[in-house]
Amino acid sequence: MSVVPSAVEAERAVIGAILLDNQVVNTALDLVSAAEFYRDSHRIIYQSIQELSADNRAIELVTLADHLKARGELDRIGGLSALGEMARETASAANIEAHCKLIREKAQLRRLLDAAERIKQNVASSSQPTEEILEEAEREIFQVATQKNFKEPVLVKDIITGVFDKIQELSELKGRLTGVGSGYPDLDDKTAGFQKSDLIILAGRPSMGKSALALNFIENVILNEKLPVVLFSLEMSAQSVVMRLLSSISKVSFERIRKGKVSLQEQADLAKAANRLSRVKFFIDDSSNLTPLEVRSRCRRLIPQTGPLGLVSVDYLQMMTSNKRSDNRVQEVSEISRALKSVARELDVPMLVLSQLSRAPEHRKDFRPQLSDLRDSGAIEQDADIVAFIHREDYAGRGGSGAGGEAELLIRKHRNGETGMIPLVFIGELMRFESAARDEYAAEETKVYDAAEE
């Protein structure tokens, strides 16, 4: 029979240390909870210690025994003599931190064993597809891994050296980007590139070009930065995504590709673009109804073969489902937003997430979107490090052709930098945005580029 992980002696030592020296109670309460004690009697005692501390009452043998008696639990823990024994056998409170951490580690191992047992039972009895069983197993392990991680406040003097090292590292870049380049110089000037762990929200009304701009960012990361990218496309199929990329790279009209009306020269240009795409690490997952947990688990499975990811993108947030189902859609979207930020931090990767807007801009004199227009949840604005809106006055929904023209990328929130407007030009036939500063695009808004001109 296997032994259940526990630290019974450490539990006794922690209780004894608190009875010996009330000054250490806050240290203990910051490091370990009553639920993490293995022995029932110890858990009951520690729960009483937590309650006495919350009431700002002294914690010593008599008050603790009186509190336990009032709750009808003194006899359950072995009476006053059991408390006295713990106090007597503890020589010092000096090792309380080490004892608390040991208790916490053993509790996590027990949670892992419980998860493993649930996984075992699920495998033995479930009629679900293997993929669903695997994802359920990952969910169980993820919940164990993300249990509360106790951290103490850090004194500035203990981190200042590391901060100076980081400043020195940044200065040695001599103006080069500290993050992943977007391919748009004006945007990179404001952001220094997409930064690791950042949640970047790109929002807009339908037909504005959210997906097109996101694919333009991705194109730069995979072809120029030469970094692996994962796109979770909940709206477009993987084939549609690749077709758009081929149009953008080859400069062959997307409509001509879609309708099969490409010339021999255009076929050759598309073949060259396909050859370039076939050599990059670009992964597309077009599953529907994805949860943040599934995004996390699928990225983690890819990392061993790709190395660190350069960018993860989700198109789009409102088509995802939460790991915690709710009848309240606003609450569910808030949960998705928070979870995606957690995934970005855990994977240490920029997370580019597309989002819908409400119809509010259509009812204003100035159609330009504001942060309050983010659909379904104010939490999106709070969780994001960058919020940017794509805006085109000419888009088809307002009577324009949608073929192309001036566009604006409006950075409305930037946690670590400046906000502002980035002028762009939309080339509708290529589903592509270009920097307005580039002369060859500023004067020719809707031209279809011949690859031979490059």
Image (tube, helix red, strand yellow):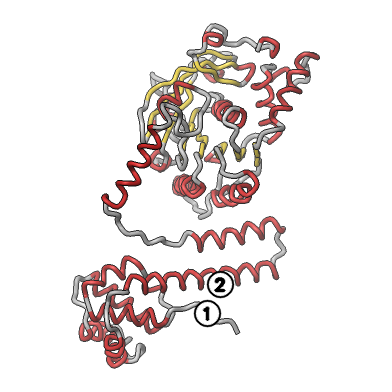
State the residue at coordinates (55%, 17%).
426
User: Looking at the rendering, in which quadrant would you find the N terminus?
Assistant: bottom right
Residue 246 in picture, x, y percent from top left: 69, 24
Mark 2, other Cα within 10 Å: few <14 / some 14–19 / many ≥20: some
279 on left or right of 293: right
Q: Give the mark, 1 or 2, whose residue is nearer the N terminus.
A: 1
Residue 72 in picture, x, y percent from top left: 31, 86
| Residue at image mark 2 | 113
State the residue at coordinates (33%, 76%).
47
Q: Nearer the viewer, residue 3 or 253?
A: 3
Which structural element holds mark 1? Answer: loop
Q: Amino acid at mark 2?
A: Leu
Residue 300 in picture, x, y percent from top left: 59, 50
Image position of 441 with respect to 50: above or below: above
Specify the quadrant of the image occupied by residue 310. top right
Q: Nearer the viewer, residue 36 or 8?
A: 8
| Residue at image mark 1 | 4
Specify the quadrant of the image occupied by residue 221. top right
State the residue at coordinates (52%, 79%).
4
Marks 1 & 2, CB-CB < 8 Å contact: yes
336 on left or right of 49: right
Which structural element holds mark 2? Answer: helix
